[in-house]
Image (cartoon, rainbow, N blue to C red):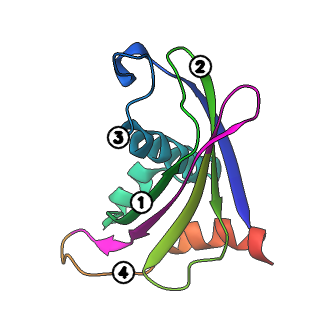
Amino acid sequence: MYEHSTTVRVRYAETDRMDVVYYGNYAMYFEIGRVEAIRHLGVSYKDIEDMGIILPVVELNIKYLRPAKYDDLITIKSQIKSLPIDHKIIFDQEVYNASGKLLTIGQVKLYFMDADMGKRAEMPAIMKEKLAVYFS
């Protein structure tokens, strides 16, 4: 299993009138977590796009347990629990507050797609190689 955590501070613009993070912003937090998890492997989203591959989200599930609030320091944990063997990659994600309390859980499924053809593609070999060490 591959796991990576990144920390961000909740900005005022991400909250509602009650200083609680607006529910739609968790999709953005999950995106931050995924981008940083891939970057930590030594490959960036830009690198993948430069290879002619895009990664659209095809499914997003979120369960809200506790609120994050303005100025909270939150940690986004991103996991890949199984090595992708075809065109899809699944991230299990969790958001924690600074006290370590679990706030939100979710799962995001993305497809590797050929940017020009608009068809499913396999994960780029370099990314597969970098991930494989976590699944041996």
Q: Which residues are magenta?
A: 95-115
Q: Quadrant of residue 47?
A: bottom left
Residue 3: percent from the left, percent from the top? 71, 55
| Disc 2 crowd, CA 10 A, few/some/many (<14, 14-19, 20+) | some
| Disc 1 crowd, CA 10 A, few/some/many (<14, 14-19, 20+) | some
Question: In terms of depth relative to the viewer, which is nearer, 95 or 1?
Answer: 95
| Identity, as a three-letter code, of the amino acid under mark 2 | Asp
The residue labelled by disc 1 is 48
For marks 3 and 1 on the same chain, the one whose residue lies earlier in the sequence: 3
The residue labelled by disc 3 is 24
Q: CA distance from mark 2 to mark 1?
A: 32 Å
**Total numbered circles:** 4
Question: In terms of depth relative to the viewer, which is nearer, 46 or 22?
Answer: 22
Residue 117: percent from the left, percent from the top? 18, 78
Tag nearer the camera, 4 or 2: 2
- Numbered badge on residue 121: 4
Q: CA distance from mark 4 to mark 1?
A: 12 Å
**At numbered mark 3, what does the secondary structure look like: helix, strand or loop?**
loop
